[in-house]
Amino acid sequence: MPTADRDAWTALTEPQLLAQCDVDTYRASGPGGQKRNKTSSAVRLRHKPSGLIVIAEESRSQHENKAKALVRLRREFFLKLRRDLAVEMLVENGLVEHADLAPARGKDGRVHLASAKDPRFWPLAGLALDVLVACQGRVAEAAAALGLSTGNLIDLLQTDDKVWQQANVYRAQFGHGLLR
């Protein structure tokens, strides 16, 4: 998918994003009390333009599950949709002042994000994965392109398990060992 699509989709309001989705509701199995199997509270969103599918079925409230599914869909955009970055552009221009990177960078030049709940995390994680793919899975090159130390980039990738897993998927695709 082109970068413009991912950027545009993540900028949409909830109603706008929901309008691009097929919404299925169903009865989820599992714990939840006597009412669990009597209401269709689980939600599956299928984002038609990207083909991504997310579900939320933790709550007995369909409204809460729909909100959780929308959050997950935005995260999936950053996890699964890559920007096509040219390595030459990364080397020449660097990404030190990129709009997704600059706000998260401290005075010491390092990225300091405590958790994936920080609103700056997912756009930055998406950028880091984009650069990792552009550098064919080589972490040191990706870190240099981002103006980070290798350790700081690894810390960023380890902030969320799904980001870490996706980084390892890309590394494996390029024939590199898994990050530990």
Image (spheres, rainbow, N blue to C red):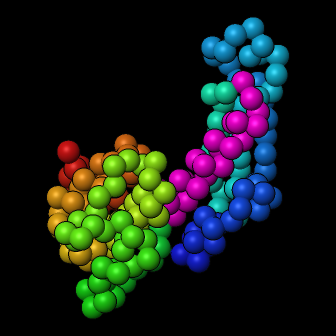
Q: Nearer the viewer, residue 124 or 26?
A: 124
Q: Nearer the viewer, residue 173 or 87?
A: 87
Residue at 74%, 29% (x, y): give it. 61
59 w.r.t. 170: above or below: above
Q: Is residue 61 magenta?
A: yes
Q: Nearer the viewer, residue 85 or 75?
A: 75
Report whether 121 appears left or right of 25. Answer: left
Tell me the quadrant of the picture where the N terminus can be found. Answer: bottom right
Q: Is residue 48 magenta?
A: no
Residue at 76%, 33% (x, y): give it. 62
Query: Within the image, what quadrant is residue 138 found in?
Result: bottom left
Counting from the top left corner in percent of width and height, residue 74 is at 58, 56
Residue at 25%, 86% (x, y): give it. 91
Counting from the top left corner in percent of width and height, residue 97 is at 35, 81
Query: Within the image, what quadrant is residue 35 found in?
Result: top right
139 w.r.t. 74: above or below: below
Q: Which residues are magenta?
A: 60-81
Q: Nearer the viewer, residue 172 or 73?
A: 73
Tell me the quadrant of the picture where the C terminus can be found. Answer: top left
